[in-house]
């Protein structure tokens, strides 16, 4: 039988009624002739509750025990989903990560897949079971301990299973009905996309779009897994949602496919840094070791052997970045006059694979922002993306202006 992977997020399994609704969608696919692997998240809010309990019990917790606690939410959902399917006369069995086993690295709370053997699940399908309900987000370390993959890891679990079992498709059920040109809460004219290329989705996910976890898109692109994002609350068919696929599967690409944003950005500037070989490594090495996710980097013109170095990072990492730079200065690794942090900025980006073959996208973007009186603080570009840092108070205006400028409300 062909295999289909179906993943249900926390809002889709938030209570027993929603689990029953999701199970109905699984039964429909079984009736269409599929063997189905269902990946489930914890019920909405449960993981946050478990994390809270861990932090309250032991602020400086053992990461192995953290994973043992926070992974338990998915186990509950998997069992309830299997029971619900059985009540619908669908042969189903639940699986925890260690039972498959989902083999991962030992990096607790940020583990990565190493292998997913097919033997156990294939044997159950041969016995007549039609559905394997697998707890997402979790795996098994080489030491035999439960691991977790980081928040949003159930998306990555679903893609990994789709790759391992050569699934026809991986359907990600969530509380939205697809991928939009931008956030509909900010721009009412935002339009749902029928298809989007892996590269575009990867950029949008990394730039702030929260529909799919970045690692899941990376994995899908590497193994050519067709992803479909659709709503668990609507009636769906084979044309529902948004298909994330190869660029070759899209007839004609728009120059810009979407506008993404991130509110939680900070701009940090090291003042009067010595301008000499190795200074960038001396700055960004300690930042990486401290776990600071640096995005944009700008180095000013050198004057009298000194320069300013500006970079952006998430606002919740500002203190960590400041401490890393202070410690580097105290060790004598770097010298600078001051460190200035601006936590009142936002990042806005336009993304599109069509940029590769069209000039003038940057000029149009900057002109549109200027027309609204929005000053650009930092710019960074890639082959299919242009991102800018602006004052946070202009975020909504910038998103709306760019959505209009590139006419994203109109279909191809």
Image: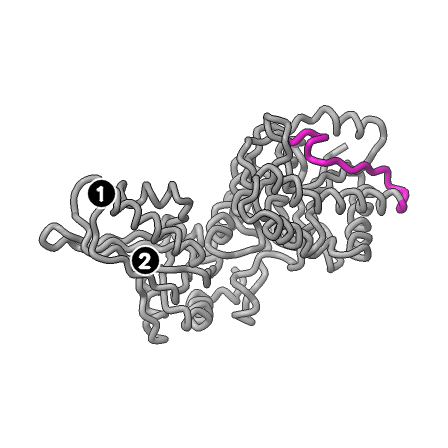
In the picture, the quarter occupied by the N terminus is top right
Image quadrant in which you'd find residue 234: bottom right
- Up the image or down, 227 lies above or below 146; here it is below
Mark nearest the camera among 1 and 2 is 1
Q: Position of residue 241 (x, y in %)?
A: 65, 55
Q: Position of residue 351 (x, y in %)?
A: 44, 55
Q: Position of residue 353 (x, y in %)?
A: 44, 50
Q: Is residue 308 left or right of residue 134?
A: left
Residue 159 at least partly seen: no
**Label disc, if present, on residue 332 of the rendered structure:** 1
**Residue under the point 52% across and 36% down:** 222
How would you rate the neighbour count of disc 2 (Cα within 10 Å): few for under 14, some for 14-19, many for 20 or more? many
- Is residue 101 a member of the stretch shown in magenta? yes
Marks 1/2: CA–CA distance: 20 Å
Residue nearer the viewer, 393 or 64: 64
Residue nearer the viewer, 198 or 41: 41
Q: Secondary structure at mark 2?
A: strand
**Residue under the point 59% across and 37% down:** 64
Which residue is situated farthest in the left direction here? Answer: 304
Numbered-mark total: 2
**Residue under the point 11% across and 50% down:** 305
Q: Secondary structure at mark 1?
A: loop
Q: Is residue 129 left or right of residue 206?
A: right
**Label disc, if present, on residue 268 of the rendered structure:** 2
Q: Which residues are magenta?
A: 87-102
- Up the image or down, 155 lies above or below 142; here it is below
Q: Position of residue 161 (x, y in %)?
A: 65, 35
Residue nearer the viewer, 226 or 251: 226
Image quadrant in which you'd find residue 395: bottom left
Q: Is residue 9 left or right of residue 245?
A: right
């Amino acid at each position: 039988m062909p295999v289909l992977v179906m993943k249900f997020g926390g809002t889709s399994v938030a209570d027993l009624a929603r689990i029953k609704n999701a199970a109905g969608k699984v039964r429909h696919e079984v009736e269409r002739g599929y063997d189905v692997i269902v990946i489930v998240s914890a019920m909405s809010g449960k993981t946050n509750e478990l994390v809270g309990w861990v932090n309250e019990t032991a602020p400086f917790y053992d990461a192995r025990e953290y994973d043992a606690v926070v992974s338990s939410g998915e186990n509950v959902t998997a069992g309830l989903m299997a029971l619900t399917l059985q009540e619908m006369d669908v042969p189903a069995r639940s699986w925890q990560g260690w039972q498959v086993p989902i083999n991962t690295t030992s990096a607790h709370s940020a583990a990565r897949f190493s292998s997913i053997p097919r033997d156990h699940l294939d044997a159950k399908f041969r016995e007549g079971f039609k559905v394997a309900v697998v707890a997402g987000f979790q795996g098994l370390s080489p030491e035999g301990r439960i691991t977790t993959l980081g928040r949003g890891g159930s998306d990555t679990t679903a893609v990994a299973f789709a790759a391992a079992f050569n699934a026809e498709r991986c359907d990600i059920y969530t509380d939205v009905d697809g991928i939009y040109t931008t956030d509909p809460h900010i721009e009412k004219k935002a339009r749902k996309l029928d298809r989007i290329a892996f590269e575009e989705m990867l950029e949008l996910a990394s730039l702030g779009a929260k529909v799919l976890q970045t690692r899941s898109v990376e994995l899908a692109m590497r193994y050519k897994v067709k992803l479909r994002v659709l709503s668990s609350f609507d009636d769906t068919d084979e044309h529902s949602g948004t298909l994330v696929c190869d660029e070759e599967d899209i007839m004609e690409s728009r120059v810009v496919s979407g506008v993404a944003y991130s509110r939680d950005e900070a701009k940090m500037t090291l003042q009067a840094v010595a301008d000499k070989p190795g200074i960038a490594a001396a700055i960004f090495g300690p930042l990486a070791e401290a776990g600071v996710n640096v995005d944009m980097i700008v180095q000013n013109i050198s004057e009298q052997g000194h320069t300013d170095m500006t970079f952006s990072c998430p606002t919740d990492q500002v203190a960590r970045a400041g401490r890393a730079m202070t410690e580097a200065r105290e060790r004598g690794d770097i010298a600078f006059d001051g460190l200035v942090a601006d936590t009142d900025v936002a990042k806005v980006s336009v993304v599109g694979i069509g940029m590769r073959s069209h000039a003038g996208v940057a000029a149009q973007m900057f002109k549109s922002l200027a027309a609204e009186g929005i000053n650009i603080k930092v710019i960074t570009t890639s082959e299919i993306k242009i991102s800018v840092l602006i004052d946070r108070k202009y975020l909504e205006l910038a998103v709306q202006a760019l959505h209009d400028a590139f006419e994203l409300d109109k279909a191809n």
